[in-house]
Amino acid sequence: MTGDPRLARLSINHKTVEGWPMPDFVDGVAAAGLSALGTWREPVAEYGLERSAKLIRDAGLRVTSHCRGGFLTATDPAARAAALEDNRRAIDETATLGAESLVMVVGGLPAGSRDLLGARERVAEALAELAPYAGERGVRLSLEALHPMYCADRAVLSTLAQALDLAAPFPSAQVGVVVDTFHLWWDPEVWRSIARAGDRIASFQVCDFLMPIPADALMARGHMGDGVIDFPPFVAAVEAAGWTGAVEVEIFNADVWAQPKAEVVETVKQRFLDVVLADAVVPDGVLPDGVPA
Amino acid sequence: MTGDPRLARLSINHKTVEGWPMPDFVDGVAAAGLSALGTWREPVAEYGLERSAKLIRDAGLRVTSHCRGGFLTATDPAARAAALEDNRRAIDETATLGAESLVMVVGGLPAGSRDLLGARERVAEALAELAPYAGERGVRLSLEALHPMYCADRAVLSTLAQALDLAAPFPSAQVGVVVDTFHLWWDPEVWRSIARAGDRIASFQVCDFLMPIPADALMARGHMGDGVIDFPPFVAAVEAAGWTGAVEVEIFNADVWAQPKAEVVETVKQRFLDVVLADAVVPDGVLPDGVPA
């Protein structure tokens, strides 16, 4: 399996191996024969930004995403200014790491607020401030639509179509979108939205959606094959839309986090080959008319 | 409050007072000065169909919805035939009760299946069998889009737009849609969809969406005002679309179910007047262009 050339397309997000110190993470990904990883701000800061960037570079790895910016819905002016400043730092980090994009989780309703439309407007306004800053530094922001069960507390951005509308005013090199199977699998419009996304796709993340949803809904993610998502249509759809980048695996799951990290990476590799890249008939309706399945 | 003429628009779904025996439920709704209720199949069957219909009629109440038909995604031919037959019985009940519509929860993925597109196709096929049967009996089916967190286990129908697409082949008198705040509040397309729905709206159900989502996600509903939903825009939007029917309150919540039933009804009345019908500025983007807020 390690020599399978298809593994060149696989990236491991640090969250999948939560708690693995940065040097072990980088060594582990390289030792597994992989060439890409996704970073999170906290472990990067803990190990040191420049030091992390050098470590990853020296290992010959590339950073497919840096997680995460966002949380742009505050109404309080001081909180809003702080959020924007924090996002500028996240953009700077993304540039230093040479990451392909900074994933943006836009934020939920402020505490006690029910003004969903207002929260969405504030995201758009904040993006207008951040996108040029990112562009000047060669950084691409990738807007992540989260599953609607997180609309109140994490992201008022709930569908890929909405992410594309939000991205539309900006150059594609400044603002792209994430296609994340966990968040989007249920959406009847997702195939149309992926086709529409085209070169706006800045990140393709996968993990499975577990049932029943656990008490902590954030932890409803699992290894590909353990849940309800049919992955090959997503692979076919993003490829038909022009995506040639990595498939990044990001799993929030306490059981996975408790396992030996190298074993988790091996399971991810196996599932990537057997489940995500499985030979499968792509159902009608997934690909745009005229694109062979 | 009891004399407030606006209460003529309020309907209490039996699920809100789960466990109240049919005669007490009917008496309680009438004693609260209300004129409408929503029924569920199990308590109707327990008390007797004809007997329930007479009881409700004699109390001068109308039935705004009968809950529920659906669960139409089985692949096994015997299970599918049984589901269709069960839905025909639910349609018959709806006719006997004189209910304004039969709410349809279409069903999730069959156990072990990941074929979401196939499940959706089977719903459409089943509807093509059931809609004429309903039409012959003067019954209207109302398709209920459920929150996407129920996509795998309850309803592969996740948005109002998708419900309208599913309803489109049938006469509006045969197949309508439910607008349920709990399921739809997060949807960035919901305002456009409500405007598009027009006379397809067959039921308007409300309750609030509680955060955090409890371990049993089915129980994430609460009294209006206890969660994150802004109700007045929904009232304005369905009215602008032409809806003049009832506002039906359906709450799944173990704490609510444990309270004295008459108190629950009083709370619902109060919240209906104070929260749902609150005077509020309708945000831009909710109503179609040209409709004054």
Image: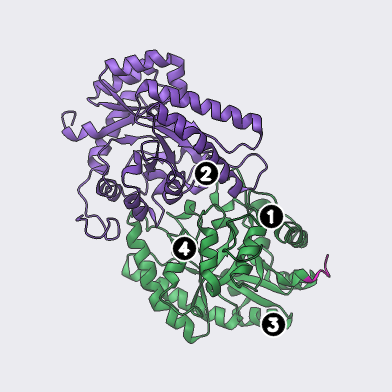
Chain colours: A purple, B green
Callout in the foreground (2, 4) = 4
Quarter that holds the N terminus of chain B? bottom right
- Gap in angstroms between the C-alphas marked 2 and 3: 43 Å
Across and down, in percent, residue B118 comes to: 32, 62
- Residue to which mark 2 is pinned: A150
SS of the residue at dot 1? Answer: loop
Mark 2 vs mark 3: same chain?
no
Query: Do pointers 2 and 4 mark residues of a single chain?
Result: no
Q: Quadrant location of residue A80?
A: top right
Dot 1 alpha-carbon crowd within 10 angstroms: few under 14, some 14 to 19, many 20 or more: many
Residue that carries the numbered disc 1 in the rendered image: B223
Q: Quadrant of residue B78?
A: bottom left
Q: Confirm whether the magenta stretch covers residue A36.
A: no
Question: In the rendered structure, which amino acid carries the disc numbered 1?
Answer: His
User: Which residue: 57% across, 54% down?
Assistant: B185
The Cα–Cα distance between marks 2 and 4, rounded to whole angstroms, is: 21 Å
> Is residue A204 in sight in this rendering?
no
Residue at image location 41% in from the left, 53% down from the top:
A186
> To which residue does mark 4 refer?
B161
Taking the image as shown, residue A235 lies to the left or right of residue A82, namely left
